[in-house]
Image (cartoon, rainbow, N blue to C red):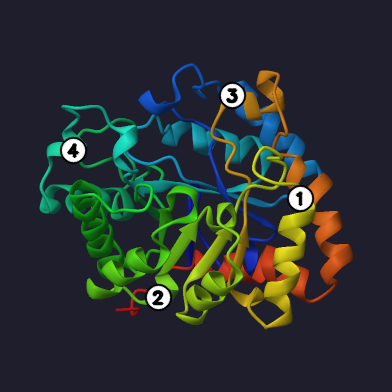
Amino acid sequence: MIVTVLGPIEAGELGVTDAHDHLFLRSPALKGQELDDLGKAVEEVGNAARGGLQAIVEVTPIGLGRRPAKLRAVAQATGVHLIGATGYHRDAHYEEGHWVRDAPVELLAKRILLDLQWGMHPDDWLTQAPLDAARAGVIKAGASYQRISALEERRLIAAAIGSRETGAPILVHTEIGTCGHEIVDLLTRERVKPNRIILAHLDRNLDLDLHREIADRGVWLEYDTPGRIKYRPDSELLDFIDAMVETGHHGAILLGLDLGRRDYFRAYGGGPGLTYLMDNFVPRLRKRLGFPADEMILVDNPSDAFLWLPDAT
């Protein structure tokens, strides 16, 4: 099953998926960019749904303003499947003295397992959430630029424990697409199967040989900068995906937008907005690739990547 904030669904129900986004977020690393308005989230997701988006993986983790009850409200209002996240981000998102920085692996893992098995608590308390609370469906983790800090390693090990005990996937922030192999090495050392690992933001490092190597390890590669012209034009990402398809690696690709700032949401007066994936990028992708490659990337891959596999240890 795939675990959404409204409960488990069959893999075939997920549909066209934005594999990495944020609807509610508050971080000291992104001051003034808080996402906290339920009405604006409903507006943004509703507009994207009218363009054909059917599911969003909302990867705001513990301690960064995630709002499980609001996620449920958005899913109910729009009909879009929402997968919520447990786990932790990279160091930059937690100020000195935050409990996440000081907690031992055992405590970090306990919080993850509570979120996966019982439901996400609306704050960071280590208390058992009500049985009708929204359960997390994916584990978030993160690494810094060109390195995995000692604290990030601790949190990655906790994520591995959560995945081993439940079969939930782990989605890992790579800073500017670095440390891909190192992250996979660490998690597989902790007995996480490669098909439970999703590496985010790899399209910020368009190294074709590197991506093919990582894909050949059985890991999911997530590209999430369509519409972010400050990184590179969409045409370059489309060319890159085309090159991955040529060697049969499209079975490892996931797509998202990662709009983790007010400035990126139309509802807050910014852009490109959640509609960008289906209204702008996907038509160009489909023209390039055609069926079935486009269907695999948008539907089949996410339905496999976010499936819980309790025996994948």
Image marks 4 and 2: residues in contact by CB distance under 8 Å: no
Coordinates of residue 75 in the picture (x, y in percent): 59, 41
Instruction: State which tag comes first along the sequence, 3 or 2.
Output: 2
- Tell me how many marks there are: 4
Residue at 51% x, 38% y: name it. Answer: 72
In which quadrant of the rendered view does residue 272 lie?
top right
Report the disc number at residue 262: 3
Task: Give amino acid for label 4.
Answer: Arg
In three-dimensional space, the C-alpha distance between marks 1 and 3, rounded to whole angstroms, equals 21 Å
What residue sits right under mark 4 in the picture? Answer: 101
Element class at badge 1: helix
Q: Residues within 10 Å of mark 4 (few under 14, many from 20)?
A: some
What residue sits right under mark 2 in the picture? Answer: 194
Q: Residues within 10 Å of mark 3 (few under 14, many from 20)?
A: many
Q: Residues within 10 Å of mark 1 (few under 14, many from 20)?
A: some
Task: Give amino acid for label 1.
Answer: Asp
Front tag of 1 and 3? 1
